Amino acid sequence: MIWVNDIVQGVLLGGLYALFACGLSLMFGVMKVINLAHGDLAVVAAYLAAGLVTVLHMPTALSILVSIPLFAIIGYVLWRTVLQASLNRSVLTTLLVTFGMSIVIENALQQFFSANSRSLSIGALATDHFNVGSQITVGYLDLAILIAAVVVLLGLQLFLSRTRQGRLIRAVADDREAAQLAGADYRHIFGIAAAIAFGTVAVAGTAYGVYTTFDPTTGTTQLLLLFAFEAVVIGGLGSLWGTLVGGILLGVVQDIGAQISTADLLLAGQLFFLLVLVIRPQGITGSRRTA
Amino acid sequence: MDRQETAHDLTPLNLPIARRSVLKGIGAGALAAGAGGMLAACGSGIKGASSVTKKDIINIGFITPLTGDLADFGASDKFVLNTIRATATYRKGFTVGGKKYKVNIIVEDSQSSATRATQVAQQLIQSNNVDMIVTTSTPETTNPVAVAAESHGTPCLSTVVPWESWYAGLGGDPLKPTKKFEFCTMFFFGLEQFLGCFEPMWNRIPNNREVACMYPNDSDGNAFRDGFEPLIKSVGYKVVDGGAYPDGTTDFTSMITKFKSNHCEIYSNCPLPPDFVTFWHQANQQGFKPKLATVAKVLLFPSDVTALGSLVNNIATDSWWGPYMPYSSSLTGQTAASLATAFETATSTQWTQSIGSSYALFEIAKEAFSAVSDPHDKSEVANALHTVNYTGMCGPINFGASTAPAPGVGVIPPVGVQWKKTTGKYPFEMKVVDNSLNKSVKIEAPLEPTNA
């Protein structure tokens, strides 16, 4: 039963990884941009949620209704002003630009919010849980995060494959010139994809702020960003539901590793990541086409 | 350390530079005040040009983590510096060997990084020609600074670091602490005092004498595993070690399962703050509810507490300073309680323990300089540091005491405190519940089980 519990907790943990990796996966899958400021943007979202809770006295869970659209707008504007211009130069430039953004964001947060750590409160829900059998405990918060991850990732996957707008995004991602010839404004379409990616970052940042504490440097010092990258790679670059699978697999492997020896939690995860890279470099879902 | 290194992996080379330039903005006040030091630094390049002024100034370097993971420790240091600089003693300067000297404090941020701490220590020693370095807050800051000071022959005073860690960091063996480090001293306490603080509290709550130990795989965690666990066993408690987990662990299921299956009723730890928040949430969720939690390294500061909300109620920890300490400043006579209130008025935030320890650094620096004939004679100042015996903001500190655990170590005995829900200005407050190690501190509240 201990092992079953480990797997259950691992799946729940994987939900957090997958939710965190969603924006990363989308930005990479569609625009081929590796967003190094991803973690810092999530921290900004957490601060935004904290601000909304304090100033507007709204419940933490509802604050995402404000922060998602706000982040989507930020994402669109940032894409049209900074990121598109750097992508036009080269993919390498986007790495440098997002890395620069990461530094700017981190220091700006430090300037405004001091280096103290914070957390988002959701009251008793943080520890409320139900039991399955005698050994397995499922926290409502963890379950909510997992459900959010499934809804966001599968929802986006469906959006990309089934809707007209989604098809446009994929068309531009697959062949920008051809899509342009057919009359698609790729800047606008990439901007929309960035807006969606940023919207998911708002959800992920809020979830993280509830899960544990954050401070201005969390975006780069915490391992979560690394886990998110790993989830994307394990699941298969460019595939959103692959990211969900990748995140969950990573969570499960980590928890099983920790059960064998507490010290091996990270090691187990990294070894699994390497193993996937060696055996299936295209990722578990194995799709070579982009989302 | 694991996490530090990972941080470097993720943030390539130019980050520290960018951070530094922003920090200059933050520390503008510190820089302005440090202008004398900068002049002195320039002067050292042009020989003799400013040698007269340079000689009349005592430069004290102060290294503390103002930003980064450990920023909670340094959060009150700006206030402490302002307070210290405003005291008559520091404003007017020290009289040393019958001569008046101006005092200049140069502040450097360790950015919670050991590498950065070494850099700024060397910079202070070589470019700013400081006469003494004072440093505070965890081995990550104090140890590299002490090592740099010892090797360059600059007097150095550390605090808020377990003495074993400090001693081992300098190359000594805490088990045979006979070696004296010529230039380095420190005041704080060690593992023995942690036990002396925690064990009486464990004894007062009826329990099955099984201690759940959550010690990470980092320098503090391994020190607790190697040094504290034998001490726990020596007083008749059983140790259940949760394993050397890596810093930044996001899921503690396996450890919680272990603690639960061993029915541990006491909980001890020394994690990084975010890891404790994650652990404590999950422990509550998965039904690990020890009767008494005595934590080290976390919940030392109010900002940690808000993150856990009501889950923090009746968690116990150690306290080396607080408004409840019956002590007062050796510089101005201001009491501990009044200093804490002044902090709350000036910053609108709750007082922290660091205020007292950082304040005492500058009291001791003053004591040492007052006992020498030439403040620029580093050996003389270092010797004076080793013999300081005074009573100030942190109570009596005697570096030469026969009871000192190691040469150059002054011990300040901590008291046991619990975070208690209040109806006052702040949701939770530290209240003294056990004074076994320091009877001069009054008990403020009864010791209550963390989970009844």
Image: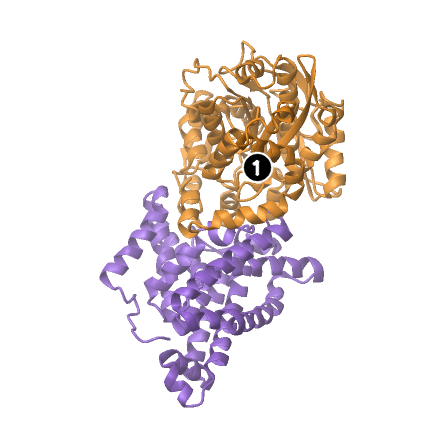
Chain colours: A purple, B orange
| Residue A227 image position (x, y, % from top left) | 40, 56
| Residue A122 image position (x, y, % from top left) | 60, 56
Q: Which residue lies furthest to the bottom in this view?
A: A182
Name the secondary structure under disc 1: strand
Q: Residue furthest left?
A: A279
Mark 1 residue type: Glu
Q: In which quarter of the image is the N terminus of chain B?
A: top left
> As rendered, which of B385 and A231 lies closer to the eye?
B385
Residue at position x 32%, y 50% in the image: A268
> As rendered, which of B14 and A14 lies closer to the eye?
B14
| Residue B215 image position (x, y, % from top left) | 44, 36
The image shows residue B27, relative to residue B208, as above or below, that is below
Q: Is residue B321 visible?
A: no
The image shows residue A177, relative to residue B239, as above or below, that is below
Mark 1, residue position = B108
The image shows residue A5, relative to residue A198, as above or below, that is above
> As rendered, which of A54 and A179 lies closer to the eye?
A179
Residue at position x 47%, y 25% in the image: B166
> As rendered, which of A124 and A200 lies closer to the eye?
A200
The image shows residue B372, relative to residue B21, as above or below, that is above
Q: Quadrant of the C terminus of chain B?
A: top right
Q: Is residue B329 left or right of residue A257?
A: right
| Residue B391 image position (x, y, % from top left) | 67, 17
Residue at position x 34%, y 63% in the image: A233
Chain to which mark 1 belongs: B
Q: How many other residues sit within 10 Å of disc 1, few (<14), some (14-19) or many (≥20)? A: many
